[in-house]
Image (cartoon, rainbow, N blue to C red):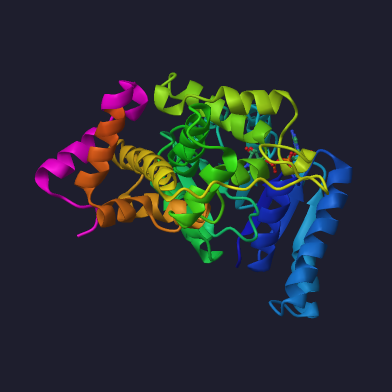
């Protein structure tokens, strides 16, 4: 019998996750405290499936059968028969604690209780449970119906059985699963920080403008979007908040220091596309910014951001956050990087990466540029990430 799935929170993420599970034939109970939101989610799922029917992915009959798999409920009690529940409500620890402890009184003893949190500790969420070995992080990317990556995050309390069940279930949904330690930002939101942070720093130093930095990253690096275009998509308010939370969570490590430029843009309400203005202007009739396509400057920018990203990827491996393979998978499948950062490092030569980082570290004397110890060790031994 197919497992019964519960999803709490019928917002952006919850409705997408519910749709993914329903498409895989599960009976899904989607709960939200706000009844109007349930109605919106129902319409959203229907529209999204309609598009998939137009694309030929599903027939009209399959669409209705998927829709009938989802039951919309306004009370936690509606989730009592579920085998696995994924919480996707507001990102506030005290609210999550209260929901998880109420949930435990309703579900069976072996129901897995997962959180889709982007930034909170799974161990802390689990502390609200009596039987905490069933807590786990199951972190989808937006939009959950399209993005293939799911980070699975066991907490210190999580049992092996919970990990194995969660991994095999999410893999059966056709998702690419990576396992990662319960540390701030997990893999993607940690390793990706320099893509934004170093680009902002380069701008603040006056080396180039937004459009030129974006051009450097897309032209030389093959990234689908430059950092400023991407931050405008994500929203400067959201992206700044993630950066600040990762910075605090890492005990103010200068590697993760947020930028005044982004803070000011956020404070001014220049959030990006959603407000019509971010680093760029989106209102009709406004001129698009043109890059200065200076190949020498462009290459300097690209290489500086790339080695900082690689240094962060190496640190995630060094600190056992995830395996080499999973760090690379996370960045290619979660944020569409053109190559895995560690495979890229091998290709460029680890000694070349270390030299670039050492140049930055020598010039600036700032801790943010310190090359990772694992990178230094590997260069000394002549090792590579992939043999
Ligand atoms: N938006 C993203 O890109 C993204 C990506 C990955 C993970 N996340 C995480 O997913 C979670 C949800 O994010 P979102 O963007 O979908 O939020 P959202 O605001 O779109 O949806 C949250 C929903 O939860 C409901 N809700 C709030 N408190 C509730 C409660 N006590 N009981 C039941 N329902 C409640 C709200 O009514 C709302 O519909 C957060 O933990 C967030 O960090 C978000």
* Magenta residue check for 173: no
**Spot occupied by residue 246 in the image (x, y as percentages of width and height):** 50, 28
Q: Is residue 115 visible?
A: no
The foreground one among 184 and 138 is: 184
User: Residue 8 at what x, y percent from top left?
Assistant: 70, 44
**Quarter placement of the C terminus:** bottom left
What is the x, y in percent for residue 3?
60, 60
Q: Quadrant of ligand 1?
A: top right
In the image, the segment drawn in magenta is: 362-387
Q: Is residue 385 magenta?
A: yes
Residue at 76% in and 67% down: 49
Q: Quadrant of residue 359?
A: top left
- Please state which of residues 149 and 31 is positioned toward the viewer in this rendering: 149
Q: Nearer the viewer, residue 88 or 365?
A: 365
The residue positioned 60% from the left and 46% from the top of the image is 230
Q: Which image quadrant is residue 109 in?
A: top right
> Is residue 206 visible in this depiction of the protein?
yes
Residue 251 location in percent, x, y? 43, 19
């Amino acid at each position: 019998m197919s497992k019964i799935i519960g999803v709490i929170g019928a917002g952006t993420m919850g409705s997408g996750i519910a749709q993914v599970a329903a498409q895989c034939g599960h009976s899904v109970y989607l709960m939200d405290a706000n009844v109007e939101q349930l109605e919106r989610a129902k319409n959203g799922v229907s529209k999204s499936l309609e598009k998939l029917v137009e694309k030929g992915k599903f027939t009209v009959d399959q669409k209705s059968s998927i829709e009938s798999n989802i039951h919309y409920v306004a009370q936690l009690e509606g989730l009592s028969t579920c085998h696995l529940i994924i919480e996707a409500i507001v990102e506030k620890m005290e609210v999550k604690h209260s929901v998880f402890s109420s949930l435990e009184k309703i579900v069976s003893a072996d129901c897995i209780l997962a959180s889709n949190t982007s930034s909170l500790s799974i161990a802390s969420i689990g502390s609200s449970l009596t039987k905490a070995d069933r807590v786990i992080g199951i972190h989808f990317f937006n939009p959950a119906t399209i993005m293939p990556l799911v980070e699975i995050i066991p907490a210190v309390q999580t049992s092996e059985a919970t990990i194995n069940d969660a991994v095999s279930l999410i893999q059966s949904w056709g998702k690419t699963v990576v396992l990662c330690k319960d540390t701030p930002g997990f893999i993607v939101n940690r390793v990706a920080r320099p893509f934004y942070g170093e680009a902002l720093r380069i701008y603040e130093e006056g080396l180039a403008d937004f459009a030129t930095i974006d051009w450097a990253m897309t032209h030389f690096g093959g990234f689908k979007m430059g950092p400023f275009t991407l931050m405008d998509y994500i929203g400067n308010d959201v992206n700044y908040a993630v950066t600040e939370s990762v910075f605090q969570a890492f005990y103010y490590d200068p590697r993760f220091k947020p930028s005044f430029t982004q803070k000011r843009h956020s404070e001014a309400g220049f959030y990006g596309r959603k407000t019509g203005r971010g680093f760029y202007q989106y209102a009709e009739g406004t001129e698009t910014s043109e890059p200065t396509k200076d190949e020498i400057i462009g290459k300097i920018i690209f290489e500086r951001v790339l080695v900082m990203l690689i240094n962060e990827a190496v640190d995630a491996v060094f600190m056992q956050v995830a395996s080499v393979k999973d760090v690379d998978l996370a960045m290619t499948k979660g944020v569409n990087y053109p190559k895995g950062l560690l495979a890229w490092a091998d290709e460029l030569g680890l000694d070349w990466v270390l030299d670039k980082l050492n140049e930055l570290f020598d010039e600036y004397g700032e801790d943010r540029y310190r090359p990772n110890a694992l990178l230094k060790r590997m260069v000394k031994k002549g090792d590579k990430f992939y043999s």
